[in-house]
Amino acid sequence: MNFHLIKGKWILAFCIVSSIIFLFLFIRRSPLVELKKFKILIEESIEVMTLDYRFRIRNFISEPAQSGKVVIVAIDEKSLKEFGRWPWSRALMAELVKGITDLNPKVLAVDIFFSEPESEKSDKALGDSFRISKEKIIIGTAFEVPVGEESKDVKDIPDQIIDSAFLRIHDSNSTDPVKADNVLPTISEISQGSLIGHVYSHPDYDGKLRWEILYLKYGDEFFPSLALQSARLSLGLKLDEMIIEGNKGVKLGGKCFIPSDERGRILINYFGKEGTFKPISAADILAKKVRKEEITNRIVFLGATAIATYDIKNTPFSANMPGVEKNATVVENILTKNFLKKSVGYIEIITLMLTGLIMGFILPKLSAIKTALLSSIFLIGYTLAVVLFFSYMGLWVNFIYPAANIITISVVITGAKYFFEEKKAKEIRSMFSSYVSPKIVEELINNPEKAKLGGVRKDVTVLFADIIGFTTLSERKSPEEVVDLLNEYFNEMTNIIFKWDGTLDKFVGDEIMAFWGAPVDQSNHAELAVRCALNMAHSLSKMQEKWMREGKEVLDCGIGINTGEVIIGNIGATGKKMDYTVIGDHVNLAARVEKLTREYNAKIIVTEFTIGHLDALIKEGLFGHYQLQERDNVRVKGKEKEVKIFELKGLKHGEI
């Protein structure tokens, strides 16, 4: 498969298809059970995990402030140590409740169950303590919600909870509430006349509790949560001023609107780990050590926090948060209107489509490494955006689908590019590594379009270097000596050609052929060839001195240079022997000019066509340390017109 098929429209098509697939997964409410399960797995396992990190990052940037209006009275280790093990007697609980209400709280939410009788006397004592302040006391009540099956029919709703149900529900058909099929109410002797609030909660797939269920349905009635009922009472609102607004949320009079999903759930905006609300020990209440201003006019939650006495909630910050602190957090969210909102989807949809289109148009122009780098920038940018949305706007933007789209496009395109670029690089190395310098090879790899192997016409400068008197030398010396001498000479000359970014065409016996201007464009190809020739002549003179000292045969050579249009390409027998070479009249002219070095006793002969490319440099004095002498107008074989030739010499011992 050709590398270029991966580019352009194919990359754009893949990016668009990938974006559409993830867009489909994001917005689709599929009736297919398996797809629905997949979406739930993604959104309630992986996506919520990223939400947890957003909580932590937000708190690292700046922990949210609390109003100080919510207080927890905790039955903690200190309380158990001083007043005995849990559960306490109803008589002691009555004393505790009275101790709190004597300090005049605005609301007292009791997050403790009293679903079974203890004794007539103790139950009455606790009930009396509730009835004294019944207008400000709410008792937590357990509802049972079936998991994975339809709820059973509810026959009767206990009298002691019916007066706590919602009185007003707008557009109930658009809601899909959590449905309970059983309730464990506080016994009537205790709860008579008191308000109740449900304490049911359901964790996500990973076991973490992130949602507050503002209301659940039991029979034909809707019951508020303990936290919602407490917030309503603290705002001084009557029961009929707490209204369910379809699948939009819950309205608390004209003071607050709580946005929720169609199930009546809101995201809990946790403030931190357990202990974020500094609790007051129940022991201190009973010992009357608590100042009145710590309780007066505040919403007080009473619950157990001692080890093994409370329901543990696993939250984004901790796996050990008491349920009572979770409820306090929800009330704090409502009172301060500090709600977390889930994005309606516009940001995600725009991101999915824009990233697909932008990456589709840009990636074809980039290498595999640059593709990976750009994709990383997109991913980091989107990650930063969702973190900032959450930290400063309380907006939960879906991370997984747009991020997965970016990663998918990046991995597939980078992998494909890397595979085909590596394949192309191997082809280029195999084709050109013996012809050109490593620098040119790397340029061809980075810009493979320059490695045109088909025949093209180009202006290049061709150099021929031929050893003078090689036939006589080969007759006088042994084959081993000849080969050693030639290898030393060819190695030095080849290094110089590569130094000046030339393309080594071939060795023909004792002759070297090289050219400049291909496979990569070199606007100064004539200058590079001439400087290379001067360098070759200078190095050869040093080698001659060395050979003389060593008593070896001394080699000499003539160099011919010409510039002009040639045909260049991979020429030979397909599948057998192919060479990247140049052919044409100007190649032949360079070869014939080299032969003239013997006739004119010159080291380097350059044609007028090459000199014409150097005129600007010569006039500006940018080409120094040389001597240029016009030698003749000659008619070489194959040319009707005479060609002007010049002898080129290096000065300062051949330095250039």
Image (cartoon, helix red, strand yellow):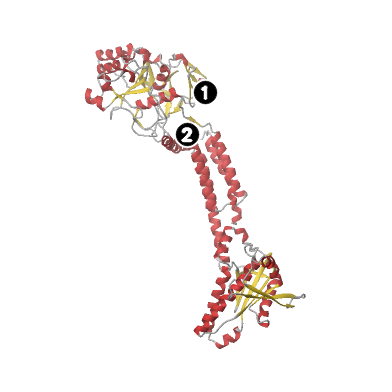
Could you say where residue 175 lies in the image, as x and y percent from the top left?
50, 23
Check the picture and name the quadrant holding the N terminus.
bottom right
Q: Is residue 594 left or right of residue 252?
A: right
Instruction: Look at the image and tell me whether residue 324 can be seen.
Output: yes
Of residues 621 and 427, the one drawn nearer to the viewer in this rendering = 621
**Label ID, residue 174:** 1
Q: Nearer the viewer, residue 51 or 283?
A: 283
In-front residue for pair 465/449: 465
Q: Residues within 10 Å of mark 1 (few under 14, many from 20)?
A: few
Q: Earlier in the sequence, mark 2 or mark 1?
A: 1
Instruction: Check residue 225 in the rendering and tell me which mark sits there, or answer none.
Output: none
Classify 118 as above or below 321.
Answer: above
Do the CB atoms of the residues marked 2 and 1 lie less than 8 Å apart?
no
Label 2 element class: helix
Instruction: Look at the image and tell me in which quarter the C terminus lies.
Output: bottom right
Mark 2, Cα crowd under 10 Å, few <14 / some 14-19 / many 20+, is many
Q: What whole-number distance in Å separates the C-alpha atoms at marks 2 and 1?
A: 28 Å
Kind of residue indicated by mark 1: Ser
Eyeballing the image, is 170 above or below 386? Answer: above
Q: Tell which residue pokes out farthest to the right in this image.
A: 640
Tell me the residue that label 2 is attached to: 390
Q: How far from the left and from the top, in percent, is residue 362?
A: 59, 48
Give the image quarter of residue 2.
bottom right
Q: Secondary structure at mark 1?
A: helix
Q: Residue placed at 67% from the left, 68% from the top?
A: 618
Tell me which amino acid carries mark 2.
Answer: Phe
Q: Nearer the viewer, mark 2 or mark 1?
A: 2
Taking the spot 57% from the left edge, 74% from the top edge, the residue there is: 493
